[in-house]
Image: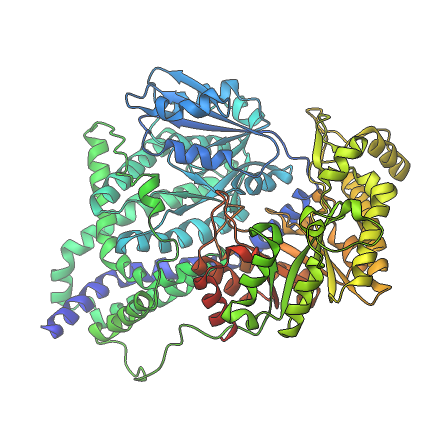
Amino acid sequence: MAGMIGTAFATYIGWAGPVILVFGLLPFVMVPLVLAYLIWERGALRRASMMVPPRVSVIVPAYNEARTIVAGVRSILHSRYPDFEVIVVNDGSTDHSEDMLRDLIDRGAIRYLAKENGGKASALNAGIAVATGEVILFTDADTIFTPTTIARGVAYLADPAVGAVGGNDTPLAPQGWLQKMLVVTSHVGTGYVRRALSVARILPIIPGNLGFVRTDILRSIGGFREVWGEDLELTLRLQRERVRIVYGARAKVLSECPHSLSGLWKQRVRWMRSYIKVVRDHRAMLGRLRFGLFGPYLALLTVSMVAIPVLQISLLALLPWIVGTGALSLTVTAIIGYFGLLTTLLIATIAVALDDRPRDIVYLPYIVMLVPMSVFYNAVVLYSIWAELRARPELWNKLDRRGAQQVARIPVHAIGRRELTAGIAGLVALGAGGGLIRGIPGGAALRIHEPLPEFKLAVAIHFPDWPSWRAALHDVLAVPELGIAERIAVSAGRADWTFFRWPGHVRWWSEPQTDTADDMLETAVTALREKGHRVSAVLDVFAPLYLTQNPNCRAADEHGNRSEDIVCSTCLAEGEFGALLVDACSALAAGSAVDEICITELYYDRYCFDDRCLAAFRRATGKRGWPRRSDGRINHLDRHLTEWRSKQVATILGRLSSAARLHDKRLIADVKVSRGNFSRNSRENGQNYDLILPRVDQLVVWDYFALNGLEPDSSGKLARYLSRELGPDRYWHSIGLWDRHHHSVPADAMGDSISAAVRGGARNLWITPGRRLSRKHWETLARLKGG
């Protein structure tokens, strides 16, 4: 029986072999273009760091999307981008879509348009008509944005020659063999191939769920047309007008993909029929060099998508006769087919790496399903041609979507050793079944989990997180695994609310410190040092009590709103509060046995823009006023502004460092991350690493991935950048245990984040806050430290 199956499989591979080889080898031709894309992308993103962010209008057309629209729109609203609007256009829905959006409408979080049903293109055009942005971003109601989707997509428009950007749509929480196969083909067909086509300026599609087009260009060509496949039709018109379209690999969204063959059939028939229609309407472009390389490419693409599948189906029907006459050697073509599978597997591996989705590597074995699925896709083409010739009705055939709650229940990291091992075994069995792979050594071990490189661990303890400071100390010392942490960071309070006995400044002692005869901080330091730990004292720069007594020092945002916690940066760098903070640091360094002092909350992302800061900015830069964007708002990314503010922060850190070093204490400083563009080095927060690092011993870089709505594996990418930019010994990689809903990050997610960071090059891991470490968290930390 097994022999019959192997023979049948080999026969099929023999027939499909040449096609598989072509699929596998074609991407190799694109390697130079892919490399050129990476070089171009780096330059474009570097320019983006200095670009004034344009206003973006996100248009969400919706028809009967009650099940998914709230999750999709909320994901857009959570975007970390300074200037955007969300326009939802209800295209005559008959379900409860409007009711689901009612809260967002009433709060003014979105602009809402309701119209009679007229199709997706008409809904998009209605949104374009009222859009106020310089860039139009069109998407679908069921698409999930990441917090950086908008920022990363707009970054590609920093190149003034670029008029439109097609984003990267990633399958959402794949389940079952079909969706996992589609993940792999998406990495190759979307991620890898579109990079190459982008460089060659022949990108044929801007996906309908993530497209960025400059507003003036989109309006000049008349917006969308009422056709089936409006995104494809728009792309061809942009190419006709010689608008440069690029692929935005880093701008990612999550979207549903079919989970059944019937769903895939309906989707691909819709795509194929729309392609035939649109190309027929734009047939004048086929092969015409006056449209650049796109004309000949469109002709080649049409042949490969329409003619070749028909030819392949014809050959399948003739296969028995061809084999019977001996005109075809199945052995030769089968070898070709296996070689094609191997090359496809290699390209898929490269594509997964390019898309920075290392966990998707476990789906690679599902690429073997491309062999039988080639018949399926050929049948789609044949049926689509027949349907077009017979003028069959154009049915939208929406996917059977799982809904946001159902998707949320799917474990993001539900990929285990068993699945990976089974997948590899499947590839080996493929070769054995066909009888063509020989000489594979038996018993070769696949090492799935390698020990992590060694790293140092710090855990931050904040007294206010417990009912009392003594309870905090008791709970921490009672942790059996505490010994794995080389360093414990303990809160020293604020300059206006200390957790230590500050001689001569009793007025600034905290209430818990006033109520006890012991020095809170020093009691904890003594107990921890007896356990063999190094201790960092964390001094907070926020000063709500001081600002209550000195309201003139409150930082002001660009609208004049005053902060209750943040001190004006000029008061800090040049004024009385700066002197108070330095005195507190000096007293801490002189009177405590701590090894170092960590300065935290010293950032200015929205502040300060009062008259005092404006005068200081004018003196330092010679500028007459704050830098402004085209809409009149302050440009927070302006180079003069970010450098001036960073110098203020660097100045106070230099004074604090000098005070600490007088007593042989080190000084380190917390800093933020420039999400979306690491290379800004937190300039927008007044924390330019290049200015701060020479004044302190180390940085503690906040990687609060869950709070930012990111996956744990994002820590690896950040660590690779920081270890290269700063050096692994010059910073602590701080993993935050909060998410955006104020819940604790699960232990396994924390472990995944740490693993990714360490494999990315981080060698100092800082976990905060310690109060959120459960037994399972500590056990995870112990396992990771033990390799």
Where does the image place residue 127, in percent across and percent down from the top left?
47, 21
Residue positioned 66% across, 63% down in the render: 524
Q: Is residue 156 above or below residue 230?
A: below
Number of marks in picture: 0
Which image quarter: residue 103?
Answer: top left
Q: Nearer the viewer, residue 459 or 77?
A: 459
Which image quarter: residue 384?
Answer: top left
Q: Nearer the viewer, residue 583 or 610?
A: 583
Where does the image place residue 157, in percent across and percent down from the top left?
60, 38
Residue 767 visible in the current orientation: no
Where does the image place residue 102, in percent across and percent down from the top left?
40, 22
Q: On the rendered structure, is 650 left or right of 757? A: right
Q: On the rendered structure, is 689 left or right of 577? A: left
Q: On the rendered structure, is 772 left or right of 399? A: right
Q: Is residue 228 above or below residue 747?
A: above
Quick one: quadrant of the N terminus?
A: bottom left
Residue 747 visible in the current orientation: yes
Query: Which residue, as the protein is rendered here, is positioned at the far top?
Result: 116
Q: Is residue 689 above or below residue 593?
A: above
Where does the image place residue 686, in percent across and percent down from the top left?
74, 44
Q: Nearer the viewer, residue 163 or 183?
A: 183
Q: Nearer the viewer, residue 386 or 416?
A: 416
Q: On the rendered structure, is 587 left or right of 759? A: right
Coloration mode? rainbow
